[in-house]
Image: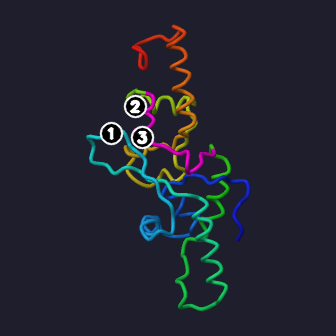
């Protein structure tokens, strides 16, 4: 199956990548460890907590791996590769991904990294995400995992965070920013 032209090389959560690949969500990390997928670990921002930092995966790599799987299955040799059991999750996930903010894999960052760039607390980044001040999205597969962890789990666009930082810096220079000075003071 050819790669979908309308989708950029999106940053996918583990569950989204699993649905696109047609595998169980625990298999995605193993595929990344084997070098089959590119993976980027996002800074969570709650350094004192024991939770793991979320990771994102490249849609282009998932599509390439799926195309390789289909070409191997076309050879019709059962010993080449075991059939994937969750192929029915792929079409609905690709449709859902068309309707979320398109954040490229190379542009993705986490709440902790955004908080460092903006020099604010990670909780304020979540408020910005929910209000639409930053280009961000929650993973489509948010039903998996602990509810507390998922309420903080956002995929943000680094470019929108940098733009927000520039606008705050400009307001500080102009003297129109309210509150404490973050960059010049």
Q: Earlier in the sequence, mark 1 or mark 2?
A: 1
- Percent coordinates x, y for residue 97 in the rendering: 63, 52
Spatial CA distance of label 3 from label 2 is: 8 Å
Look at the image and say whether residue 103 sits in the magenta stretch.
yes
The percent coordinates of residue 63 (x first, y second) are 62, 65
| Residue at left offset 59%, top offset 45% | 103
Is there a contact, CB below 8 Å, between mark 3 and mark 1?
yes
Residue 46, labelled with which disc? 1
Residue at the image position 73 percent from the left and 58 percent from the top: 5
As displayed, is residue 179 above or below residue 127?
above
Residue with the most extreme top position = 175
Q: Is residue 54 above or below residue 176?
A: below
Q: Secondary structure at mark 1?
A: loop
Assess disc 2: are there few (<14), some (14-19) or many (≥20) residues with their C-alpha within 10 Å of its C-alpha.
Answer: some
Dividing the picture into quarters, in which one does residue 115 lie?
top left
Quadrant containing the N terminus is bottom right
Residue in front for this viewpoint, 176 or 97: 176
Q: Is residue 82 above or below residue 65?
A: below
Left or right: 78, with 111 as reference point: right
What residue is shown with label 3?
Answer: 152
Q: Which mark is first along the chain, 1 or 3?
A: 1
Q: Disc 3 versus disc 1: distance between alpha carbons?
A: 9 Å
Task: Answer whether residue 106 is magenta in the image.
Answer: yes
- The label number, if any, that marks residue 123 in the structure image: 2
Circles 3 and 2: CB atoms closer than 8 Å: no
Residue at 61 percent of width and 61 percent of height: 60
Range drawn in magenta? 102-118
Does 101 sit above or below residue 126? Answer: below
């Amino acid at each position: 199956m050819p790669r979908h032209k309308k989708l950029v090389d999106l940053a996918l959560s583990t569950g989204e990548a699993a649905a696109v690949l047609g595998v169980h969500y625990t298999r995605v990390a193993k595929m990344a460890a084997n070098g089959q997928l590119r993976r980027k670990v996002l800074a969570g921002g709650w350094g004192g907590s024991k939770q793991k930092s979320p990771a994102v995966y490249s849609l282009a790599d998932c599509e390439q791996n799926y195309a390789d799987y289909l070409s191997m299955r076309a050879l019709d040799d059962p010993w080449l590769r075991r059939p994937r059991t969750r192929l029915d999750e792929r079409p609905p996930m690709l449709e859902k991904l068309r309707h979320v903010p398109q954040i490229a894999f190379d542009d993705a960052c986490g709440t902790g990294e955004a908080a460092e760039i903006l020099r604010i607390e990670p909780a304020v980044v979540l408020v910005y995400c929910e209000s639409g001040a930053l280009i961000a999205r929650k993973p489509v597969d948010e039903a998996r995992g602990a509810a507390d962890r998922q309420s903080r789990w956002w995929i943000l666009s680094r470019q929108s965070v940098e733009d927000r930082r520039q606008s705050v810096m400009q307001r500080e220079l102009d003297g129109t920013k309210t509150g404490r000075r973050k960059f010049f003071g």
